[in-house]
Amino acid sequence: MNIGDVAEASGVPPKTIRYYEDIGLIRPLRSANGYRTFRDSDLHKLAFLGRARALGFSIADCRNLLALYEDDARTSAEVKDIATGHLQEIDKKIADLSEMRATLSELVASCAGDHRPDCPILTSLAESNEATV
Amino acid sequence: MNIGDVAEASGVPPKTIRYYEDIGLIRPLRSANGYRTFRDSDLHKLAFLGRARALGFSIADCRNLLALYEDDARTSAEVKDIATGHLQEIDKKIADLSEMRATLSELVASCAGDHRPDCPILTSLAESNEATV
DNA sequence: CTTGACCTTCCAGTTAGTGGAAGCCCTATC
DNA sequence: GATAGGGCTTCCACTAACTGGAAGGTCAAG
């Protein structure tokens, strides 16, 4: 299979596939004309990577997960550790965003959004918080 | 004030302040020895930027917010538009992360995390989803 | 034999900074 | 006067994970 075919089949764009080769995540063969040639195993890996990335795993995590996937001597504990760590990162991000959201939605709600210049959003961004300390 | 003083006072690191000058967000004066000299207005802007960034506004948004802040002829509608747009982005991110979180926490829950190699996390990442389509 | 769709490599740009090196400036101390 | 320190300067490189685009080779169809 050529790169276009695996891109289609895996859902990973050609540019990204080349990038994954660059950083050593996959190692497709080359045919005589210089084109990359992908085996079924390469396609599998790309689909695996696509799913792992869709779950938000970093490339470093993906590399480790892929290595574990191909290691018969792995333990599920190793995999679970990575996943648990990532889950915690996600929770942190959600918490941070939720906090921003809370503040921001209050500000938005308090702003008239009309033709006048008075705006509590700007006031809040501008004012020093001495009062709240 | 020198850069270290405003960094302290605004909470924005010196490196970041220099970067903000590079991209034209602030324009501190220079004293004879080449040091940046910050007026109160510069300090104000930096604090403003720090708060806007803490709410997750992009640099582009910050630039617009700052311009509106200094524009007496602004309307609060303009400000509210930016804030509302950003709020929607935050909601989108939270939604995406929540979806990842849901899938991932299911997988983590289903994984024994022991010394054996069998792992539903890896299985899920590896399997094609023909069945679910 | 040419057209168009592929494929190749390489360079640059994206976000918002951060780290570090080389070197100037200023104050204090010996 | 020399020197040590801390702060300041610029500039370059690096981060994550791609993405866009240019210049050019390959291949099948008409």
Image (cartoon, coloured by chain):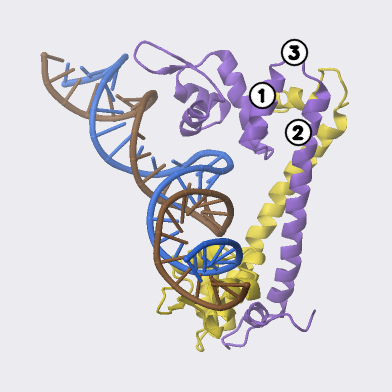
Chain colours: A yellow, B purple, C blue, D brown
Instruction: Name the residue located 73 percent from the left edge and 52 percent from the top edge.
Output: B93
Image coordinates for residue B48, horizontal then vertical, percent: 64, 26
Quarter of the picture holding the N terminus of chain A = bottom right
Say which of B53 and B71 sits in front: B71
Which mark identifies residue B66? Answer: 1
Instruction: Name the residue located 60 percent from the left edge and 84 percent from the top edge.
Output: B114
Q: Is residue A57 above or below residue B94?
A: below
Which mark identifies residue A103? Answer: none
Say which of B35 and A117 sits in front: A117
First along the sequence among labels 3 and 1: 1
Q: State the image quarter where residue A54 is shown.
A: bottom right
Q: Check disc 3: other Cα within 10 Å, few if <14, some if 14-19, many if 20+.
A: few
Image coordinates for residue A37, horizontal then vertical, percent: 49, 79
Helix, strand or loop for disc 3: loop
Rounded to the nearest whole Å, what is the CA distance between mark 1 and mark 2?
12 Å
Image coordinates for residue A30, horizontal then vertical, percent: 42, 77
Image coordinates for residue A57, horizontal then vertical, percent: 60, 65
Q: State the image quarter where residue D28 is shown.
A: bottom right
Q: Check disc 1: other Cα within 10 Å, few if <14, some if 14-19, many if 20+.
A: many
First along the sequence among labels 1 and 2: 1
> The disc labelled 2 sits on which kind of residue?
Ile
- Chain containing mark 3: B
> The disc labelled 3 sits on which kind of residue?
Asp
Q: Are marks 1 and 2 on the same chain?
A: yes
The residue that label 2 is drawn on is B82
* Residue with the most extreme top position: B32
First along the sequence among labels 2 and 3: 3
Helix, strand or loop for disc 1: helix
